[in-house]
Image: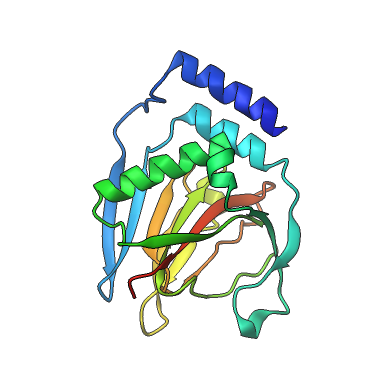
Amino acid sequence: MSLNIAKKELVAMRSQDPDMKRLKEPTFRKRQFDERPLILIDDLFNPDFINLFDRFIKTLPCYLSEYDAEDSRHVLHWIHEFALEDVNTNPLLRHMYSRIISATEKAFCLEPRIQLKRVHCNTSLYGDMQFPHCDITPGMTWLYYSNPVWEQSWMGETIFYDSDREPVCAVFPKPGRVVVFAADILHRGGVPSRECVEARRSVAFKFLNQDK
């Protein structure tokens, strides 16, 4: 799907529902990792937008260029790197960004003076390897799960670790779910199970906290 087609579908969607209303109010679940926040936000996007956005990113070129940490540079991952200005010029990303930032402000988890540094789409397939890592530190990460359908048997949960490097939290890649977390929480991307014939897609917004 081209960006122009996606724009037209988004305009048509908004003409029918100007506020892009959801079926229900978004829900927030919070937990702390050594006083660092992790927040799950569900029902932030309606199903039509979730489908439209995923159809769009499935057409983007991906490159085998990302790695998790210095000691795992030999294992690369498929990503599409967005330009930072795409958050303003791409209406799909702009809508997603505005919805998430409003939700994080509502949940009182928006860090002061955070600056967006990266936006990229992650693509993971059965058989891939993912390693524990931290993101831009000090900072914050928003992780959006893009697949409009994700079965329980497909697994692919994001794993979060405590300060002893013990896995203590698994987040299921529910369609349209957003995870907001302190970027220095150790975490690992999920890999789909053998039963899954789909790529697991997510979009990461990574911020630097300029106050620390």
**Looking at the image, residue 96 lies above or below residue 49:** below
- Residue 202 or 4: which is nearer the viewer? 4
Where in the figure is residue 153, as x and y percent of width and height? 55, 50
- Residue 123 or 174: which is nearer the viewer? 123
Q: Quadrant of the C terminus?
A: bottom left
Q: Residue at x 31, y 30 (%)?
A: 24
**Looking at the image, residue 178 lies above or below residue 133:** above
Horizontal arrangement in the rendering, residue 75 relative to residue 182 (left or right): right
Q: Residue 74 is drawn in which quadrant?
A: bottom right
Q: Residue at x 60, y 50 (%)?
A: 201
What colouring style does the render use? Answer: rainbow
Q: Residue at x 47, y 41 (%)?
A: 96
Residue at far top of view = 16
Where in the figure is residue 37, as x and y percent of width and height? 30, 65
Q: Residue at x 31, y 62 (%)?
A: 111
Residue 176 in view in this figure? no
Horizontal arrangement in the rendering, residue 40 relative to residue 9 (left or right): left
Q: Quadrant of the N terminus?
A: top right
